[in-house]
Image: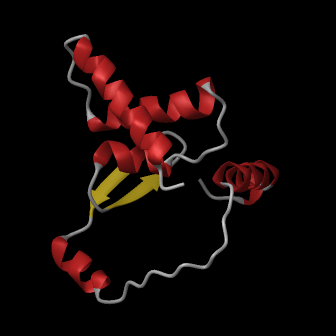
């Protein structure tokens, strides 16, 4: 529920690259993790968790059809944001893959109206 499957996928891919004597880039790990989760095991997931796990830190992540752009958030901005953060327990649970499937279906249905 907190991106753990994507963190595991990124870590596994990084380990496999290391075992082959390769140093994978953060972008390479993000793209490969997206491919594994979406194309190979057919999970209904977005791409943000894989990118967040691969790059680490607190970032703005922009996705286009053919690119992922990661911009680190400056520390002074993070400190400013921290002053306004609150955490609530609602008591409700959700199934992330079902929500993602609905979002993917809606995106496909409305693609002509969306800006990419």
- As displayed, is residue 97 above or below residue 85? above
Q: Quadrant of residue 32?
A: top left
**Viewer can see residue 67:** no
Specify the color scheme: secondary structure
Q: Quadrant of residue 60?
A: bottom left
Is 3 placed left or right of 90 in the picture? left
Is 55 placed left or right of 48 in the picture? left
Foreground residue, 80 or 106?
80
| Residue at 32% from the left image edge and 18% from the top image edge | 16
Residue 27 placement (x, y as % from top left): 33, 37
Residue 112 placement (x, y as % from top left): 76, 53
Residue, far front: 91
| Residue at 20% from the left image edge and 70% from the top image edge | 74
Foreground residue, 94 or 76?
94
Residue 107 placement (x, y as % from top left): 73, 53
| Residue at 30% from the left image edge and 47% from the top image edge | 55
Task: Indicate the quadrant containing the N terminus: top left, top right, bottom left or bottom right.
Answer: bottom right
Residue 65 placement (x, y as % from top left): 55, 43
Residue, far right: 109
Residue, far top: 20
**Viewer can see residue 97:** yes
Is 91 placed left or right of 106 in the picture? left
Q: How many marks?
A: 0
- As displayed, is residue 99 above or below residue 79? above
Foreground residue, 116 or 21?
21
Foreground residue, 33 or 27?
33
């Amino acid at each position: 529920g907190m991106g753990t499957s994507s963190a595991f996928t990124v870590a596994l891919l990084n380990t496999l690259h290391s075992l082959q004597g390769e140093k994978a880039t953060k972008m390479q790990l993000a793209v490969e993790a997206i491919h594994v989760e979406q194309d190979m095991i057919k999970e209904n997931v977005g791409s943000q968790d894989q990118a967040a796990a691969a790059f680490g830190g607190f970032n703005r992540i922009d996705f286009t059809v053919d690119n992922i752009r990661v911009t680190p958030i400056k520390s002074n901005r993070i400190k400013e944001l921290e002053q306004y953060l609150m955490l609530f327990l609602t008591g409700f649970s959700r199934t992330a893959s079902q929500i993602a499937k609905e979002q993917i279906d809606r995106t496909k249905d409305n693609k002509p109206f969306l800006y990419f």
